Amino acid sequence: PLVMFPQVDDLVVSLPISLELGAIKVYQSGLSTALETDFGLLVTYDGQHYASVSVPGTYINGTCGLCGNYNKDPEDDALRSDGRLASSVPELGESWRVPHPERKCSPGCVENCSVCDASTESLYFSPEYCGFLNKSGGPLWECGSVVDPTAFVHSCVYDLCSARENGTGLCQAIQAYAAVCQGLGIPVGEWRAQTGCGKCGYAGAGGNLQSMPEVLVME
C-alpha cells in the first residue's frame, strides 16, 4: 500500500490526529488522507494525483478560486483571479498561482499543451482509452445518469495529449471519476480488471497491452 507521512509543524505524526481541541481532524480514509474541520470543510488527497475539496451549503456564493464560486451555475466557475472568465484550464490555474518565497513554480505550457494529432486525439476519445468512462454497459455506466462524465473524458484526453513522457494519466482519470461516483454511493464495477490499472503496465480497456501509458498504481 501507499503510505503517507503527514507532518504538523515539521514533525512527522501518525494518524489519526486531532488539533485545536478537535476543531481539525486528520485521518486515513481509504487510500486517501482526509482533513476535516468543525466548520464543514473536508479535504482529501491520495498522495499521488487526486484531491477533493468539499464545503457545506452555507458556503453557497461564498467561494472563489480553482473550485469555482459555488453558485450552482457551472458556466461561470472558471473565473480568473481578476474576475474574468478563463479561456482554458492552464490559464485558470496560472491566474490563481500564489508566489512562494522559497519555491518557484513554472507555469509550463499555457496556450497549446497538446502533443496529439487529430487521429491520436480521436483514439484517446475511444472506449479503449478515455471513452471507457462513458462506455455503454461498462463498469461506470450506471454513474453517468448522476455524474456527467463528459468533463472527465475531456480532461482525460487533455492529460494524455499533454504528456511529454509516458505517464499514469488514463488510470488516474478513471480513478478520479470512480471516486466521485463511489463518494455519492453509486455502485462501481470492476474497472481495474478491465483496464489493467493496478498492474505494472497498462493493459488497455480492450485487454491488449499498450505502450502508452505505463502505469504503477499503488493499492
Image (cartoon, helix red, strand yellow):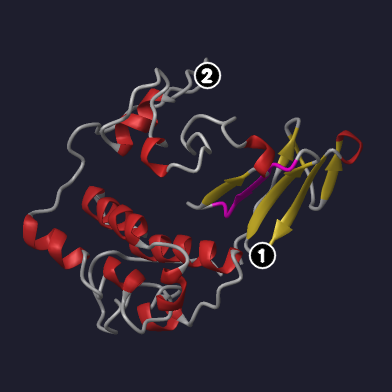
- Please give left or right for residue 172 compared with residue 155 in the image: right
Q: Amino acid at mark 1?
A: Gly
Label disc, if present, on residue 10 of the rendered structure: none
> Along the horizontal axis of the image, is 80 left or right of 19?
left
Residue pointed to by mark 1: 30
Q: Residue at x 63, y 57 (%)?
A: 32
Residue extending farthest to the right is 21
Q: Which quadrant, please, contains the N terminus?
A: bottom right
Give the residues drawn in magenta, as a range: 40-47
Q: Residue 200 in the image: state x and y as whole percent.
A: 40, 73
Which quadrant does the C terminus fall into?
bottom right
The three-letter amino acid code for the residue at tag 2 is: Glu
Write the residue at 45% across / 77% down.
142
Residue at coordinates 81% horizontally, 52% vertically from top-left?
16
Q: Which residue is nearer to you in this view: 26 or 79? A: 79
Q: Give the quarter of the image for residue 129.
A: bottom left
| Rendered view: 61 above or below 185 | above
Q: Is residue 111 magenta?
A: no
Label 1: few (<14), some or many (≥20) within 10 Å? few
Give the Cα distance between marks 2 and 1: 33 Å
Q: Position of residue 56 (x, y in %)?
A: 68, 44
Q: Secondary structure at mark 2?
A: loop
Query: Which residue in the structure is indicated by mark 2?
Result: 102
Indicate whether 139 appears above or below 109.
below
Q: Residue at x 47, y 60 (%)?
A: 176
Residue in the foreground of this view, choosing between 194 and 62: 62
- 18 vs 74, left or right, is right
Based on the displayed image, in which of its 4 quarters is residue 112 positioned?
top left
Is 205 located above or below residue 104 in the figure? below
